[in-house]
Amino acid sequence: MVNGGGGGFMSGAMKSFKSNRALLIKERGAFDIKKIREFKGKPFAEYKKFRFKRASHSYLRKIREATKQDQLNSLLKKVALLLVSIILTVWGFIWLNNQLFQLFY
């Protein structure tokens, strides 16, 4: 099934094309067109089998190390961001406290 726009338009165009082709052949009547337009599936054994390459142990090790390094970098960035936000929050409370203290005293 085609996702997105135009899928119904194309299937209609293909059915119309097949019907017109079927009418050109003289032996077939107008009622035999339905047989031509039907989907003809292949047996399951005729479908192409996919074979995927297997990754070597050294390649998997490199991927694992790169993933660990990325996770460590991400953790360090999150910790640094957390520390900066805590420091700014504490500084903001101290500054606000000083401003309020000067306002009332």
Image: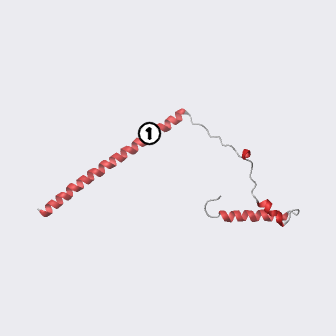
Quadrant showing the C terminus: bottom left
Choose between 42 and 96: the one closer to the eye: 42
Q: Is residue 95 left or right of residue 17?
A: left
| Relative vertical location of residue 23 with respect to residue 66 in this rendering, above or below | below
* Badge 1: residue crowd in 10 Å (few <14, some 14–19, many ≥20): few
Q: Residue at x 60, y 62 (%)?
A: 4
Give the residue type at disc 1. Lys
Res 92 visible: yes
Q: Which residue is mark 1?
A: 68
Q: Residue at x 83, y 65 (%)?
A: 31
Q: Is residue 84 left or right of residue 64?
A: left
To which quarter of the image does residue 36 belong? Answer: bottom right
Residue 80 place in picture, x, y as percent: 33, 46
| Relative vertical location of residue 16 with respect to residue 45 in this rendering, above or below | below
To which quarter of the image does residue 49 belong? Answer: top right
Rendered image coloring scheme: secondary structure
Residue 70 place in picture, x, y as percent: 43, 42
Residue 68 place in picture, x, y as percent: 44, 39
| Relative vertical location of residue 18 with respect to residue 59 in this rendering, above or below | below
Instruction: Name the outermost residue toward the top.
Output: 57
Q: How many marks?
A: 1
Res 21 visible: no
Q: Is residue 66 left or right of residue 80?
A: right
